Image: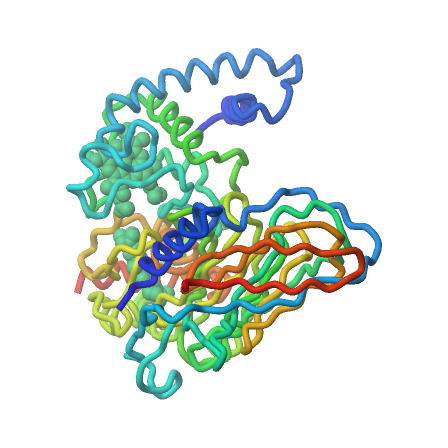
Amino acid sequence: MLSRRDMIGASMGFAACGGSLALAGAALAQASSYVPGAVIGGGIDGIVRVGDNLSAAEQIIIGKDNHICGEGHATPDPVTLSDERGLKNAVVMIKDIARGKPWAKRERFDIVQEKCVFHPYIQFAPRSFELSILNKDPVLHNIHAYEIIGRARRTLFNIAQPQANQVDRHKVALTRGSIIEIDCDAHNWMSAWIVTSDHPYVAVTDSAGRFAIDDVPAGEFELVAWHPGLGSMSTRAKVASKARAAATISFGA
Amino acid sequence: MISHRSAAGMLLLASALLGASALSAPAAERPGRAQASLAKGKEIYARECAACHGVKGDGEGPGAHIVNPKPRNFILGVFKLRTTPSGQPPTDDDLLRTITQGIAHSAMPSFRELPEADRRALVGVVRQFADIKTAPRPIAIPAAPEVSAALLEKGKTVYTALKCQTCHGDTGTGDGASSLTLKDDAKGRIWAPDLTTGVFKSGDDAKALYARIATGLDGTPMPSYASQAKPDEIWAVVHYVRSLAKR
């Protein structure tokens, strides 16, 4: 079984095969000044797939607070595939896009801890935002967020929520990396992620592995998919004016 | 304590080194002084600290691999012993205290014998490695209550209500249900310490323990309780924890 650290390491292997990306964090690093313009039309419809030769994801025993958390095993960062091997919960973003559609930046994001699981598991946000944190469980959760910087991770905050229905609001502003990992030290199988972006051209894949990115200006772009258990992989997509382009991003053979 | 003047100088210097802002004319002489102090600090750092914390401040000095916990990697800018909210850099006083006292239960020695000016110069070096450009603000710590049997009893109730036992165990000996699976930022194994030994990283100082519980130890699983516990509850649990050693 691979540990989570190995998984991130493995992602770099993938990236090296792709020939374009070096580090998990650097892969999604963005140019910082986005210039919003008019609505454009057109876009990219795509799918993220995974090849056959995939190692098993790490499983952890649910070894405490079973009356709330349930029994058995949990997989912190599951690689969930459809029958067509479409990958759920991958973040897909256009790399280095400096201008495009209007962007009404969301300023507040939510994360909920319920039955010892974070909801949502993965989401995307601008570089700075406010995170509203709710613990629905009558057990202690400590929400512990890290900024991923290449191979290192650094604590962004670590807040105890010992009682049910406690809410904390925390301002987050990333300075060095672009991916936020969220853990609970009390329940080591709990995991969530926030991928930050400097532009609005981002999507999360559905259970079929599909995604849609709308209002993309005409041009050729690098499209990067990132999944916490697999790392990043990219492809190129060519978008004609007001048309929809198709894209497939494949992890492994 | 660092004077306003030299702290401001250090800030200016930091931004000058980073090319972030042009210096205004009246302030121009201050960086000169701060620069001299920083240069001195770097000399002392090379002699006293680099063996553990590394020449580049990345915690990878030649002696680093033989000690546990590992020397801090200053570049990441994450510090355990702070009076500032979770995720914030430490104040200059926090760093000065650590350098002066050292850290119990670790290889970090006390540098009390160095002249105070030298220890302050070292603070500047650590700040520069960690890229601390702001003047971080400490949390408010209200005056300590009188210790009484009632306060200790309250502290015991608070300890359970705040679920410290999850990691530190019912009696504070470090055997909580989650204690076996704790990891630090580098994903290394870390333990919830036995709170009954009476030895804490920054001594038995009650105010320091208040800060540890209110703001957490960044880089470790020890979380911040400032938002979910009232100051009187934190004080009660501080004195309860201190009393554990005397039983």
**Residue B151 visible to an observer of this rendering:** no
Residue B41 in percent (x, y) is at 36, 21
Horizontally, residue A240 falls left or right of residue A20, namely right
Please give left or right for residue A82 compared with residue B108 in the image.
right
Q: In which quarter of the image is residue A144?
A: bottom left
Q: Nearer the viewer, residue B89 or A183?
A: A183
x and y, in percent, of residue B72 in the image? 31, 41
Task: Name the colour scheme.
Answer: rainbow
Residue at (24, 44) in percent of width and height: B70
Q: Residue at x 30, y 59 (%)?
A: B183
Q: Residue A186: x and y, percent?
A: 35, 70
Q: Is residue A170 left or right of residue A108?
A: left
Query: Which picture quadrant has residue A162?
Result: bottom left
Q: In this rendering, does residue A67 appear at all?
A: yes
Q: Where is residue B89 in the image (x, y as percent from the top left)?
A: 46, 42
Q: How many marks do you count on the picture?
A: 0
Identify the residue shown where x is 46% and y is 76%.
Answer: A81
Locate the N terminus of chain B by quadrant.
Answer: top left
Quadrant assignment, res A91 = bottom right
Instruction: Tell me: residue B30, above or below residue A129.
Output: above
Quadrant of the snapshot with the C terminus of chain B: bottom left
Viewer-closest of A227 and A245: A245
The residue located at (43%, 36%) in the rendering is B130
Residues B57 and A76: in front is: A76
